[in-house]
Image: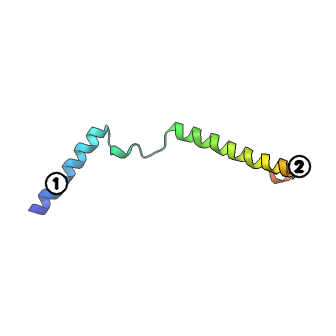
Amino acid sequence: MLIFMAMNGDAEGSRVARDRAGGPEGARGPAVAGPGFWVAFGVGWLLYGGLIVSVMVVEGESVGPSLGLAG
């Protein structure tokens, strides 16, 4: 009986915490990344690619074949 009460109390407390956090996802926030994350990820990825190409050009390597381009 005490175990059931403890479990029920814990579940009730978790429900209240979720309600206070503003939704079913709870205090951790949404489970999926928002659009801002993907924009930042894409910009970072492009900057990283640009850095690699810049280093290759400075080193004097031909960038075309590495990128799958003729030349």
**From this viewpoint, is residue 25 visible?**
no
- Tell me: 16 left or right of 64: left
Coordinates of residue 13 in the picture (x, y in percent): 20, 48
Crowd class of label 1 (few under 14; some 14 to 19; many from 20; radius 10 Å):
few
Q: Is residue 32 left or right of residue 2?
A: right
- Kindly identify the amino acid type of the residue bearing the numbered disc 1: Asn
Q: Which residue is mark 2?
A: 70
Q: Nearer the viewer, residue 17 or 48?
A: 48
Write the residue at 64% across / 40% down.
43
Q: Callout 2: helix, strand or loop? A: loop
Q: Secondary structure at mark 1?
A: helix
First in sequence, mark 2 or 1: give its number.
Answer: 1
Residue 7 can be seen in this image? yes
Snapshot colouring: rainbow
Give me the C-alpha separation between circle 2 and circle 1. 67 Å
- Kind of residue indicated by mark 2: Ala
> Residue 27 location, x and y as percent?
33, 44
Q: Which residue is mark 1?
A: 8
